[in-house]
Image (tube, rainbow, N blue to C red):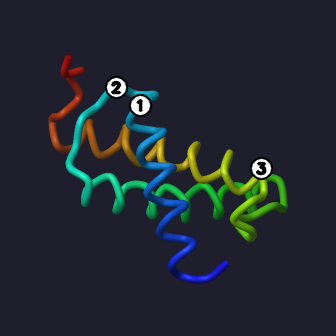
Amino acid sequence: MNFFAFLVLGLLAGIIARMILGRQHGWFATLIVGALGAMVGGWLGNLIFGVGVNEFWSLSSWVLAVGGAVIVLAIYGAVSGRNKVQR
């Protein structure tokens, strides 16, 4: 997967994770959290299941990226003190 596709995957995974957890952050923070989440999800998927984030249109790539983004966003919210849901 090229760099641009990885950033798009990370941004979309960050948006989905933000919707799942109900936290509000800026777009740049969402991009960073999503890209880090895609890396964490790919690393964990490769470590546990032997599957990484390799192809943009692969279901396993999306599941791993969103799962990793949820983990990273939860940690980011706990560290930054933004763990309250804004409505």
Distance from disc 2 to disc 3, alpha carbons, whole Å, reads: 23 Å
Residue 84: x, y in percent?
A: 20, 22
Q: Amino acid at mark 3?
A: Leu
Q: Residue at x 45, y 63 (%)?
A: 35
Q: Quadrant of residue 66?
A: top right
Residue 46: x, y in percent?
A: 75, 63
Q: Residue at x 50, y 64 (%)?
A: 8
Q: Judging from the image, what secondary structure is the residue with disc 3 in?
A: helix
Mark 3 or 1, nearer chain start: 1
Q: Amino acid at mark 1?
A: Met
Q: Which residue is mark 2?
A: 22
- In this rendering, is residue 36 above or below 59? below
Closer to the camera in the image, 51 or 13: 13
Q: Which residue is mark 3?
A: 59
Image quarter where the C terminus lies is: top left
Q: Residue at x 26, y 36 (%)?
A: 78
The residue most toward the top is 87
Q: Which residue is mark 1?
A: 19
- In this rendering, is residue 39 above or below 86? below
Counting other residues with Cα less than 10 Å from the Cα at mark 1, is it few (<14), some (14-19), or many (20 or more)? few
- State yes or no: discs 2 and 1 in contact (Cβ < 8 Å): yes
Counting other residues with Cα less than 10 Å from the Cα at mark 2, is it few (<14), some (14-19), or many (20 or more)? some
